[in-house]
Image (spheres, helix red, strand yellow):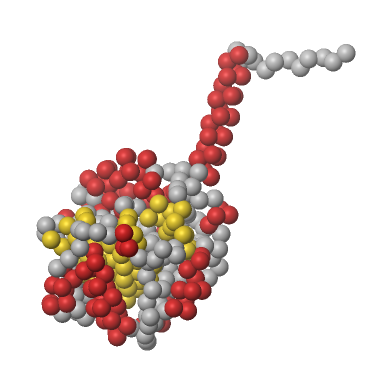
Amino acid sequence: MNLKNSIDKEGYIILSNVLNNNELEYGLSSIKDKMVDYKITKKFIDNILFKKIIKNTDFITDPHYSKFRLSNHNNSKDASLFHGDIYNNTKSELLNIYTCLCYFDDAQMELIPGSHKYNNPGFSIESYNKKKIIEVKRGDILIFHSNIHHRGINYYKTENRRVLQVFRVFPDKETYEREVSKLVIVKTNESTFIKNFIDPIMVEIVKSSTIMGIITFFHYILRYNDLLYKITLIDLSPSDKKDRYVSYEAGSSMRFIDLSGNYNLNVNIVTDTNVIYLPTGTYYLHIFYFILAVIVMFFIIRCNTNGKILPKKKIF
């Protein structure tokens, strides 16, 4: 079975031990005192990482990518629960956009093979039970369809978990030009509820395997049924999502062309200005306000009539 068939069937592949120590050390040379020179990181991506990927795969030939992120333990709040990097709201069974991860340390990833093939309605216990832990080693490259359900695990069991994530990778120029206009990015970090309530809690919860097990299950129900961002009232309307690829982006971001100096780890570095960025949606917030207004009006009327229905007036 060739790699294209393999990744289309399972949703992911691992290129084992394809980066040597000198190449890895060059990639890590961008980190100095927990600050990052992202210009060095991009050179590593363009001149080393993708050359290795092109050489060792049969489906990525001329990659075009729109974002990358270098982290070390500090992406746990947005990556420790099952999620897709992109959600496919088109009629295509396969999303030919990939996420490529380069590991500078041994780590573990939990994913659900086959979850990249569909956006089925209704919670599927069958899908959840297919979850699988994979081991990735220093020097490995993990590639998966961007909509596969996955999460990082055991963040705090090693001193370092340095990983370079390259997001929204189109395999060639033709695919990029055909598909990029369908891609929209929703900035979830603009949500006050997520930023001030959910994120701080998640940083602590990931340290407890028992609590994480319970939360992971219920979180997956919401994700699978496309309810998570509706409940938090920041999702786009159905019409805005129709026939589009939607990515919900957490954390801070900067455009690569605006970089001047070193920056913190775990910053989303945007390399493609053609991608459409949208603010968080207000569609479900308006529905919530409408329902709340109806409830308030009901109780006002009820109080004014002492709980009794006013008799109808006769018209003479």
Q: Can residue 34 be seen in this view?
A: yes
Compared to residue 291, the image places residue 143 above or below, namely below
Q: Give residue 131's position: percent from left, percent from top.
A: 33, 64
Q: Is residue 275 left or right of residue 57?
A: right
Query: Which residue is more in the foreground, 173 or 243?
Result: 173
Within the image, what quadrant is residue 23 found in? bottom left
Q: Residue at 82% x, 14% y: name it.
A: 314
Query: Which residue is more in the foreground, 105 or 224?
Result: 105
Q: Residue at 57% x, 34% y: name it.
A: 290
Q: In this view, does 249 lie to the left or right of 163?
A: right
- Give the quadrant of the C terminus: top right
Q: Give residue 169's position: percent from left, percent from top.
A: 38, 71
Q: In this view, does 189 lie to the left or right of 202?
A: right
Compared to residue 116, the image places residue 3 above or below, namely below
- Give the quadrant of the N terminus: bottom left
Q: Residue at 37% x, 85% y: name it.
A: 58
How many numbered marks appear?
0
Q: Give residue 293's position: percent from left, percent from top.
A: 56, 29
Query: Which residue is more in the foreground, 260 or 88?
Result: 260
Query: Which residue is more in the foreground, 20 or 268?
Result: 268
Q: Is residue 29 left or right of residue 88?
A: left
- The extreme right residue here reads 316
Q: Give residue 310's position: percent from left, percent from top.
A: 70, 15
Within the image, what quadrant is residue 30 found in? bottom left
Q: Can residue 223 be seen in this view?
A: no
Q: Residue at 25% x, 54% y: name it.
A: 76
